[in-house]
Image (cartoon, rainbow, N blue to C red):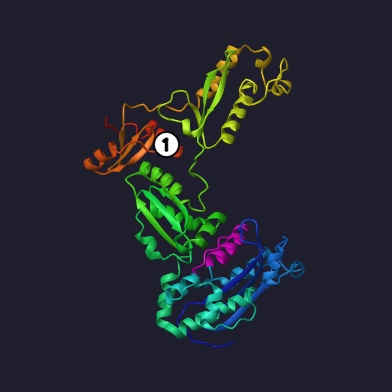
Amino acid sequence: MNKQSIDYPTLAFIDIETTGSNFDRDRITEIGIKTLSNNGVSIWESLINPHLYIPQNIQRLTGISPQMVSDKPSFEEIARDLKAELEGKIFVAHNARFDYGFIKASFKRMGVDFKPKVLCTVKLSRLLFPNQARHNLDTIIREHGLTVSARHRALGDADLLFQFWQICEREVGKERLLEALNQLVGNASLPPNIDQELIDSIPDTPGCYIFYGENRTPLYIGKSISLRSRVMGHFQGSLTQRKEMKLSLQVRDIDWIETGGELGALILESKLIKERMPSMNIKLRRSRDLCAWSLNKDANGALKPTLVNHKDLMPGLQDNLFGLFYNKREANSYLKAIAKKYRLCEVLLGLEKAVDGKACFGYQVKQCSGACIGIMPTEMHNLQLRTAMELYRVQVWPYKGPIAIKDNGEMIVLDKWCYLGTAINEDELTELKSAGDAEFDLDIYKIVKKALAGQYQNQVIHLS
């Protein structure tokens, strides 16, 4: 062994290879550890049988084939030795969330709790070399002239981290490096590109937060009554949830906007997602094809749903609207679902073409009560249809004019279910009251309707 006298805790430089990036589905195929302690430098490595197929692209990247691991031990078989090897050491890895997350998940499946102190070398690089444009491992290799022995093999990459540590010590000195170590250890839940200082500056108040990726591209927008706690929840969840891990690895910056309370945060989230279209939000997207059903009698006295398209919709003013859907396909799916549930006739609903004198297909498979051939009276079919649709009636605006809802010091101004803005004083309130009509938004309609039926029903100020 190479004797060295150091002032640091014992450091285990770790890299793993896996069958993929999903903690739950994928498994580890190789672990390499290079330990630096007061006793010198030691190594530990093992190929691991994942008992899963190794995808071709992973085989090409790492050079690890199914044949190489077929007779190797499983993780469970090396777990005891691995835990002993890492006991009492600082867990040092590049993008440590990945390596730490996989090993933690593997131990967890065995019922073993694994909670070492963790140092991420991406964070270390960003802290010590802030002028460096990128901090991925290939950039670090190039910028600092590291010697590559076996790229994308566990021990080879672990050795690169050990070399980088030596470079850091030479460039900034032991004292500064130890200071950086103490500053970064313990923040394993933070993404590589996010500093604790930024997290500490986020208030624990209601509002919305925006995660940005490269070039300030919006990744995700969320809301909370406790901003800092919710943001940290994303990062802590990334150790066990694939979506959160993907978000954490891409995030480069965080912004936030405070609101008076929960209602303001809900409305702001809906607006921001539609304006900025973050890549990882799949809900609350803007719809230009909004539609609803209305009920009208045909020449035979049967109630028939008629689709009201976006250009003819006036939600909040029209009394005969049911459902509000993002598009025609969703509207038809809803109508088919209630037809099946209440045994209504799809011919009378306009979902199926009538054939003179013949029952509809639904009647033939016992999903229609026979209104199409007179077995069920038209009046009874009308009653059942209206009863089913009534559950989804679009509520007419219940006030004479605009209102404001008090939300912890802010006043949220609305008219005909449309959001006009947020006021904090009388002048702003007067300005918003006379601002004119705003565009109807289905998500905001749902938010406001629920709020007025719940905790905000006694917080209404009439402005007309």
Q: Is residue 232 left or right of residue 389?
A: left
Q: Position of residue 304 (x, y in %)?
A: 57, 20
Q: Determine which quarter of the picture holds residue 14.
A: bottom right
Q: Determine which quarter of the picture holds residue 429.
A: top left
Which residue type carries mark 1? Phe
Residue closer to the observer: 52 or 415: 415
Residue sitting at 48 percent across and 66 percent down?
A: 192
- Residue 120 visible in the picture: no
Say if 89 sits above or below 416 in the image: below
Q: Is residue 450 left or right of residue 140?
A: left
Q: Position of residue 375 (x, y in %)?
A: 67, 12
* 401 within the magenta span: no
Which segment is the magenta one? 96-118
Residue closer to the observer: 278 or 175: 278
Residue sitting at 60 percent across and 58 percent down?
A: 23
Say if 125 sits above or below 274 in the image: below
List the residue tagged with mark 1: 440
Assign the C terminus to one quadrant of the image.
Answer: top left
Q: Position of residue 109 (x, y in %)?
A: 62, 57
